[in-house]
Image: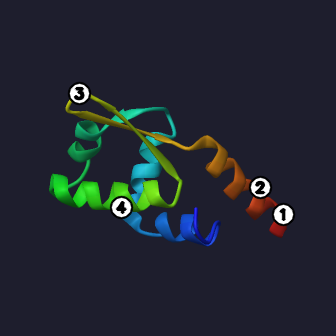
Amino acid sequence: MDGFPSSAFKAISDPNRLKIVEMLKGGEVCACKILEEFEFTQPTLSHHMGILIRAGVVSLRKDGKWAYYSLNESVIKSLSDYLRNLL
């Protein structure tokens, strides 16, 4: 997590990635379900997910050919704590 928390905030600053993060708040989601919510291609989804993963915001679990994504709860908690400490 180079540059944390700025890299995590930068990763979720994109409206599409923020929507993905919101989709993951309920738990693990298959890439196919995420893709259904957007009008972009699988390579574009992979690009967005790569940014979220590199920032530490999202975790990836592969099961055969399927990719499942979930929030990295410790990073989300750290972001929340960081913002709370600003107030």
Identify the colour scheme used: rainbow
- Upstream in sequence: badge 4 or badge 1: 4
Q: Which residue is mark 4?
A: 16
Q: CA distance from mark 1 to mark 2?
A: 6 Å
Q: Which residue is mark 2?
A: 81
How far across and how far down the image is residue 45, in percent?
26, 55
How far across and how far down the image is residue 30, in percent?
31, 34
Q: Are marks 1 and 2 in contact (CB under 8 Å)?
A: yes
- Upstream in sequence: badge 2 or badge 4: 4
* Residue in the picture at 36% in, 58% down: 50
**Residue mark closest to the camera, 3 vs 4:** 3
Image-based side of 19 in relation to 31, left or right: right
Q: CA distance from mark 2 to mark 4?
A: 24 Å
Few, some or many residues within 10 Å of mark 2 (<14, 14–19, 20+)? few
Q: Which amino acid, mark 3?
A: Gly
**Residue mark closest to the camera, 3 vs 1:** 3
- Give whichever of 87, 50 is nearer the camera: 50
Q: CA distance from mark 3 to mark 4?
A: 26 Å
Q: Which residue is mark 1?
A: 85
How far across and how far down the image is residue 4, in percent?
64, 66
Few, some or many residues within 10 Å of mark 4 (<14, 14–19, 20+)? some
Q: CA distance from mark 3 to mark 2?
A: 36 Å
The number of numbered discs placed on residues in the rendered structure image is 4
Q: Which amino acid, mark 4?
A: Asn
- Upstream in sequence: badge 3 or badge 4: 4
* Residue in the picture at 51% in, 43% down: 71
Q: Is residue 18 visible?
A: no
- Upstream in sequence: badge 3 or badge 2: 3
